[in-house]
Amino acid sequence: MFKWKKLGRIFNPLEVKNRSWLKEFAQAPAVLIFDNFIRVYFSCRPPRDNYGQYVSYSAFVDLNRYNLFEIVNLAKKPILELGELGTFDEFGTYPVSVIRHGEEIIAYLLKERGIDNIGKCIDLLSKKIEYQNKDRFLEDIGENKITRIRLKEYVKENCKKEKQVRFWNIKLPFSGSDKKTDPNETQLSDYYQLADCCSPLPGKDIIGIHDFSKNKIIIHEAKCPTAIADLAFGEKAINVKWTSQTKISVLKEFIIQGRDEPGILNKIISTISKNLSVNIKSINFDTEKSNFKAKIKLYTMQEDFSENLIKQLKKIPAVNNIEIIN
């Protein structure tokens, strides 16, 4: 039986300089042995952000194989960057386990939040490929008996782009009774319009004010100054409220390009959000010189939504090009 002997601390992240992303913790070590050094992979974190939250990175430190107290190299950057907004590794990865696979080094990682879900995914995937034993499934992947190409093909064949997604509606009074508007109805815009002054968000307290010039009910946030002013001048508040429903929807991805200008992202989001049959999944916005490029993924349950959205977005002067990915 082995007996452990404590020799002392080898590596202290608090002493590291010129690595803003490596300031605290050196957790969950995983080791690979090379001819002249031992590489120790570990999880680390930069200081907390303004909200007191951490993100997690994975890095490595190389130790002299014949004198483990001698540090010969330290990762210059994380082995994996943070994921994009809304992705599983948006807040980093922890922990990470590494193995050799031919001349490659393969990392098996868990996301920083919701670790239990990965085990469930592995169970499901192994059973779908007709493996009764999850451990055997993982061993065969490591031994290349199940190729990454086969896994990708399976996921592509079996993962649907349809999903149950929650959508918001507005319930309006008609002839003494409530009529629940359906986002699939083409006459939806005949009933009401979301106010541009406050752009009410689903779930917040709202009121309606009848605009006789447009013959529509304008929906404001309950505390909107414009609505309060209208009420002060004698306009009558109309009882409206949010409702929600879950429906099968399809994932759409748009790439929008054009001239960068102040507030352009807000204009794009506002244009999309005015249609309540939309649920935005993710937004990636980048600028270069005087141009912008936005990648937007969203769920919709309207068949003709893409065509209608493009028409609305093209009305924004700074938008030059719109492309549908799927």
Image (tube, grey):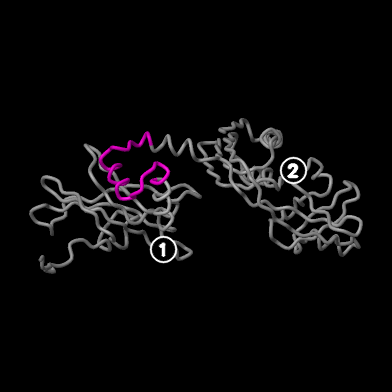
Where's residue 231, x and y in %?
86, 63
Depth check, front residue: 214 or 178: 178
At numbered mark 2, what does the secondary structure look like: helix, strand or loop?
Answer: loop
**In this rendering, is residue 46 above or below 296?**
below
Answer whether residue 271 is visible to the viewer in this image: yes
Of residues 304 and 201, the one nearer the viewer is: 304
The percent coordinates of residue 177 (x first, y second) are 87, 59
Image quarter (top left, top right, bottom left or bottom right) of the N terminus:
bottom left
- The amino acid type, in three-letter code, at marker 1 is Arg
Instruction: Provide residue 126's location: percent of width, then percent of height.
Output: 38, 46
Which quadrant of the view contains residue 207?
Answer: bottom right
Q: Magenta part of the protein: which range?
A: 126-150
Secondary element under disc 1, as helix, strand or loop, is loop
Q: Residue at x 73, y 57 (%)?
A: 243
Check if mark 2's residue and mark 1's residue have beta carbons within 8 Å: no
Please identify the quadrant where the C terminus is shown.
Answer: top right
The disc label shown at residue 48, or none:
1
Q: Residue 184 shows which numbered tag?
A: 2
Q: Is residue 147 magenta?
A: yes
User: Mark 2 against mark 1, which lies toward the viewer?
Assistant: 2
Residue at horizontal 21 percent and vertical 53 percent from the top: 31
